[in-house]
Each structure stands twice: as C-alpha cells, then as structure tokens.
Image (cartoon, rainbow, N blue to C red):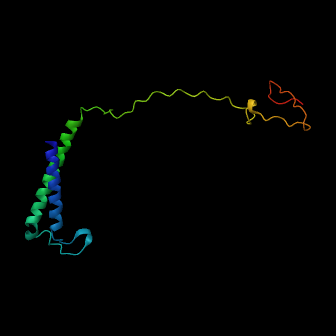
Amino acid sequence: MFLFLTVVQALVAAMLVGVILVQKSEGGGLGVGGSPSGLMSARGAASFLTRATSVLATIFVVLSIILAAMAVHETSGRDIDTSLQRQTAPVAPVPAQPADPLGGAAANQAAPAPSAAPGATPAPADPLSGAAKQ
C-alpha cells in the first residue's frame, strides 16, 4: 500500500507541475506588471487550470500526510541493521620502545670511536656505555 501511494503521489506531483507550467502568467508575481484585478476576476478564479491546480495541490498535501503517518508506523519497530558490520579481531598493543634520554642513536647502535693511528688495534668497548675506551 505504501509503494502504491508513493507512485500515486509522484504522478500527482508531475501533473501539478504540468498544470502550473501551462497556466498563463497573470503578472503580479515578484512585482512584475499586470492588472491587479486580473487575479481576482470571476473569469480568472473560475478557470479550469486554477481549479485543477487547487485540487491537485490538496491531493498532494493529503497524500504527503498519509505517507508520513504510514512511514512512522512501518519503521518504529525496526532495529538497526548490523548485517554489514565487520567483525575484526582486536589488535594486540605494540610494546613501546624505551626513549633515548640523549635523543641520539641507541646505545647498542653507537658508532665505533675512530682509532688514533692507522693499523692500531681498537680499544675494547665499555659494556655499560657501549663506547670504546681511550
């Protein structure tokens, strides 16, 4: 029934647009010329297009109210559809790396100290600081 009334309302809306576009402009809209008595004359008020416009507009408003009431009753008991919700496994947190207080390279990646003379044996590394002793 809801779909049928929606189609009827679309047809009424199309007819209403067509009837409004076919009507002759009597002026007065947005201050554009025309006689002020043209709109209120007996011939202007009794024309077929004017009556058709008012009837179609009334039908359109009534159908809009009926469809709004039907939509409230059809959708009030529905739950949120979660069928498209992705099921993902929780991600384990990555352990944080300890911050280097000096802001430089890590202690185990320190560059070796330059040797004093070519061919000399390098000094043994200090196990606590990672730097070569001199």
Residue located 19% across and 75% down the image: 34
- Horizontal and vertical percent for residue 51? 9, 62
Assign the C terminus to one quadrant of the image. Answer: top right
Q: Quadrant of residue 131?
A: top right
Residue at 25 percent of width and 32 percent of height: 78
Q: Is residue 27 above or below residue 57?
A: below
Q: Position of residue 3 (x, y in %)?
A: 16, 44
Q: Nearer the viewer, residue 128 or 111?
A: 111
* Front position in the image: 100 or 56: 100
Can the viewer see residue 76?
yes
For this orientation, the residue located farthest to the front is: 119
Image location of residue 58, percent across then percent down: 13, 54
Task: Note whether residue 101 is visible.
Answer: no
Q: Quadrant of residue 48?
A: bottom left
Q: Residue furthest top?
A: 127
Q: Is residue 81 left or right of residue 35?
A: right
Q: Name the residue located 86 percent from the left edge and 37 percent from the top edge.
A: 114
Left or right of residue 14, residue 122 in this image: right
Of residues 15 and 49, the one nearer the viewer is 15
Q: Is residue 107 above or below residue 36?
A: above
Q: Is residue 77 left or right of residue 124?
A: left
